[in-house]
Amino acid sequence: MAMSGRRLRLPPLRLVRAAWPWLAVLLAFAAVRLSKGAFVLDAYALLSRPFWPGTAQSEWLRSAQQFDRQTRLQQLEADNRRLRGLLDLDRAGVSLVSAPVISRQAQGWWQQLVVGQGSLQGVAPGDAALGPGGLLGRVASATPSTATVLLLTDPASRVGVWVGRVQHHGLLVGVGTPRPVLRFIEQDVGVRPGDVVTTSPASTLLPPNLTVGVVQSVNERAVPAPEAVVQLAAPVDAVDWVQVRVQRP
C-alpha cells in the first residue's frame, strides 16, 4: 500500500514528462485542424520532390500540347473548307434545306428515314442528304411536305467514293449495319485504317468531295478485290436533323 501511495504522489515535473508525448500528439492534431492540413501537404511535397516528373514527362507534355495544337489547326482548316464550300454552293445556285427527321422504323433503322421537308421546298429525288459531319444518303422520293432518304447503310445504296491519300476510286455499298463496305476494283490499293473517304470527283449522282467517313479496317484477302469497312462521319444512328442539298430554280 505504501508503494501504491508513492506512485500517486509523483512530483509535477515527472507528470509533465510522462504526459509530454500525448500533449505533442494533441498539439499536432490541433495544428492540422487549424491549418486544414497545409503544413502536411508542404511536408509531403518536400518529401516527394525527388519523385516528381522529370525531363521525360516534360517532353511527353510538350508533345501532347503540340498534338493538341495540330488537331485544333486541322479542325479550323476543315471548318474553313466547309464554310468556303457553303459559299460556293450559294454562288452555284445550290442551297441547303434543313429538315427534321419525323419518322424512322425500328426494323429499317439502317435503311431509310423520313424528313419534314418536301417538293414545296425544292427537295427532289436524287438530292444529297447531309448530317452533322458528312453525307447521310440520297433522297429516294418526295411528297409536297416530306421526303424519304435512302441511307448509305441501306443494302440498296451504291455510291461512288474516293480515297484521296491513295488516289483510288471505290464503291460504297450498304450492308444493313452501321458501317457500309467499301469495295475496290484494283488489287493493290494501299488503303489503311484512318484514310478519309469522300464522294468521288467523277460521280454523276452526288456532288464531289463530300465527306463520307473514315476507313476502320481493311480486308486484303477479299475476293475479287480488297474491301474496307467505313465508319461514317455523320451519326446515322442518332441524327435528328438533316440538310438536303437542293438546286434553286
Image (spheres, rainbow, N blue to C red):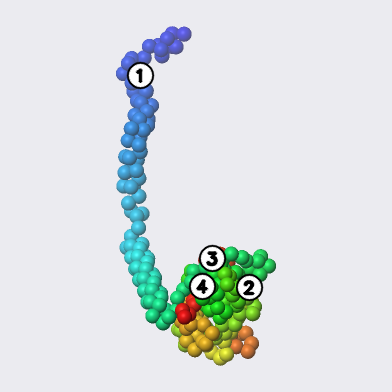
State the mark number for residue 99: none
Disc 3 versus disc 1: nearer the observer: 3
Q: Residue lying farthest right?
A: 107
Give the spatial CA distance, label 4 vs label 3.
13 Å
Q: Amino acid at mark 1?
A: Leu
Q: Are marks 3 and 2 in contact (CB under 8 Å)?
A: no
Which label is found at residue 100? 3
Name the residue tied to disc 2. Answer: 111
Disc 4 secondary structure class: helix
**Label 4: few (<14), some (14–19) or many (≥20) C-alpha neighbours in 10 Å:** some
Secondary structure of the residue carrying numbered label 1: helix
Mark 4 or mark 3: whose residue is earlier in sequence: 3
Label 4–label 1 contact, CB within 8 A: no
Which label sits in the foreground, 2 or 1? 2
Mark 3 to mark 1: distance in Å?
Answer: 85 Å
Mark 2–mark 1 distance (CA, rounded to whole Å): 88 Å
Distance between mark 2 and mark 4 Cα atoms: 24 Å
Residue named by callout 4: 121
Provide the secondary structure element on which disc 3 rests.
strand
Q: Residue at x 55, y 78 (%)?
A: 124
In the rendered view, tell whether residue 60 sits above or below residue 37. Answer: below
Q: Position of residue 118 (x, y in %)?
A: 55, 72
Q: Amino acid at mark 2?
A: Gln
Q: Quadrant of residue 78?
A: bottom left
Q: Nearer the viewer, mark 4 or mark 3?
A: 4
Q: Which residue is mark 1?
A: 15
Q: Residue at x 57, y 76 (%)?
A: 139
The mark nearer the N terminus, 4 or 1, is 1
Residue 100 x, y percent position in the rendering: 54, 65
Residue 8 versus residue 21: which sits nearer the camera? 21
